[in-house]
Amino acid sequence: MTMKKSLFWTLAVVITLGSAVYQRMTGPTYPLKGKAALGGSEIRFELPRSAETTADAEVAVPAPTAVAGALDWRRFPTDDAWTRVPFVREGDRLVARLPKQPAAGKVAYRVTLTADGTDTSLTGDKPAVLRFKDPVPIWILVPHVLIIFAAMLFSTAAGLAALDRKRNPRRLVLWTVGLMFLGGFVLGPLMQKFAFGVAWSGFPFGTDLTDNKTLIAFLAWIVALVTGRGGRPARPFVIAASLVTLLVFLIPHSLLGSEYDYSKIGQGGNR
């Protein structure tokens, strides 16, 4: 029985949205969120793990007046000594700032709050790591995000169509290949170039998982495209490519991403 068109696309959208949200929320640049009991109050915090190179990165924690704190930071990954910065109260928030770094530069930092003589670490046993990036023009950012999402959507739809013997997924395969090429190999490198100064840092030039997973998914779809020449459905290859795409895009975004080599500039906080 053929799935109704409305149900077919609803299922494709739900699967795509679910994987996109999971990828985003598990990525190393997603804010570190949590809560802690301090000074008789529950504090809900959100610590940044991404910032732009245009200014120092603000770390702000809502806290009652009875709570004080400090932020310790150092460049990552280095053996620099930790630098302590006291939080300054601004209204109902404690605020400290991390000095801006070069594009792809990272800073490890720990947040410790004190109330009633007791110290509480908001970052736990391991420090949070924040990466700096140069600003990306909105005219590249928005199309890139929309087109990559569309590629994931058509990839999922093609896989679902291949499972249905009454549907031919060929047209969806063509859309997937075209969208993935435009989003991943045209706009993606432009994003990288603006943000980190390097257009491609995946195979064979580096280990960036975002670039490499895009390459793996695209190659899987090229195989599905070639095996479907002449309008053949090539169902096993389409299903495999759809599953490969789903799996690789579940890998957290920006994992093993561009990282500045601090050995170029030696000791110190900024450029």
Image (cartoon, rainbow, N blue to C red):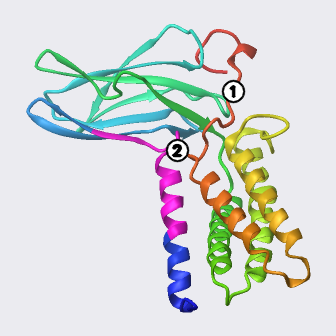
- Say whether residue 92 is magenta: no
- Say whether residue 27 is magenta: yes
Q: In which quadrant of the rendered image does the C terminus lie?
A: top right
For label 1, the crowd category at 10 Å Cα-Cα, with few meaning under 14, some 14 to 19 and many 20 or more, is some
Q: Nearer the viewer, residue 29 or 166?
A: 166
Left or right relative to 94: residue 163:
right
How far across and down, in percent of the image, does residue 61 sit?
A: 30, 36
Identify the secondary structure beneath mark 2: loop
How far across and down, in percent of the image, does residue 109 sit?
A: 44, 23
For label 2, the crowd category at 10 Å Cα-Cα, with few meaning under 14, some 14 to 19 and many 20 or more, is some
The total of numbered circles placed on residues is: 2
Residue drawn at 68 percent across, 46 percent down: 210
Q: In which quadrant of the rendered image does the N terminus lie?
A: bottom right
Q: Is residue 141 visible?
A: no
Q: Quadrant of residue 197?
A: top right
The residue identified by callout 1 is 260
2 or 1: mark nearer the eye: 2
Q: Is residue 62 visible?
A: yes
Residue drawn at 31 percent across, 27 percent down: 88
Q: Nearer the viewer, residue 15 or 92?
A: 15
Q: Quadrant of residue 63?
A: top left
Point out the stretch of residues depicted in magenta. Answer: 15-34
Left or right relative to 57: residue 270:
right
How far across and down, in percent of the image, does residue 183 sit?
A: 74, 62
Q: Quote the CA–CA distance across marks 2 and 1.
A: 18 Å
Q: Earlier in the sequence, mark 2 or mark 1?
A: 2
Say what amino acid the circle numbered 1 marks: Tyr
The residue identified by callout 2 is 27
Residue drawn at 58 percent across, 47 percent down: 251
Left or right relative to 268: residue 123:
left
Say what amino acid the circle numbered 2 marks: Gly
